[in-house]
Image (spheres, rainbow, N blue to C red):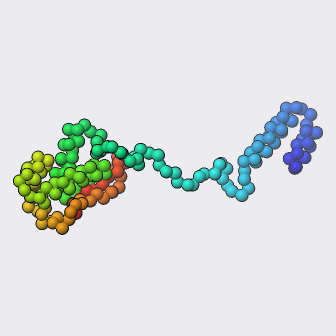
Amino acid sequence: LALLISFSLVVRKSHSSSTTMRVLAFLLLLVGASAFVNSGTPFLGRPVNTVERQSTSSLNMISHRKGFKKLGKPADQRKALLRALTTEVIRHGRIKTTLVRARAVRKHVDHMIELGKRGDLHARRQALSWMYDKDLVHSLFEAAPDRYSDRQGGYCRVLRTVARQGDNAKMAIIELV
């Protein structure tokens, strides 16, 4: 109401149409800007939905009819990587690698320890064909029956750690129990 009264006074006093148009544009600008201001809250946009959405990423999907993770490598490189990781986990007892690789190598480490518990010649030859270090296989076959006699499986655990700095890859520690 006050704007309309001031506008009518300005229009009566001014004789040129350009001044009237300037005042009219200024008043419309004020009225238009004040339409967006909400007196109760300082927020000037549409409300944000705070409900968490379910991720539609393919990383969370179940991989039906997929035998194993391919680890982004051809078959020969994948086999060499898994053999090397298996050998190093058994040698050092704990290694740090990516989460996907740790989960993939867990199966092979458990299998080598099962072979070590069994202890016969065929199991020893199977372990020698997978692991790279012959002396490590002999020490595994000496220690595994005593160390894991009360366990029926689950000889290693995968612990998630902080993501890698360079590429933000999910990292994990795989260790013997």
In the picture as drawn, the residue positioned furthest to the bottom comes out as 150
Question: Where does the image place residue 23, in percent across and percent down from the top left?
Answer: 83, 39
Q: Nearer the viewer, residue 45 or 23?
A: 45
- Does residue 171 lie above or below 13 as drawn? below
Q: Is residue 97 visible?
A: no
Q: Where's the C terminus, which quadrant?
A: bottom left
> Residue 4 sits in which quadrant?
top right
In the picture as drawn, the residue positioned furthest to the front comes out as 65
Question: Where does the image place residue 60, in percent across and percent down from the top left?
Answer: 41, 49
Q: Nearer the viewer, residue 65 or 162?
A: 65
Residue at image coords 27%, 52%: 102
In the picture as drawn, the residue positioned furthest to the left comes out as 121
Question: Where does the image place residue 107, in percent across and percent down from the top left?
Answer: 23, 52
Residue at image coords 26%, 49%: 104
Residue at image coords 18%, 54%: 111
Q: Is residue 177 visible?
A: yes
Question: Where does the image place residue 128, in percent across and percent down from the top left?
Answer: 9, 49
Would residue 130 be found to the left or right of residue 67 on screen?
Answer: left
The tally of labels here is 0
Q: Nearer the viewer, residue 121 or 101?
A: 121
> Residue 66 sits in which quadrant?
top left
Residue at image coords 80%, 41%: 28
In the picture as drawn, the residue positioned furthest to the right comes out as 12
- Does residue 94 lie above or below 74 as drawn? below
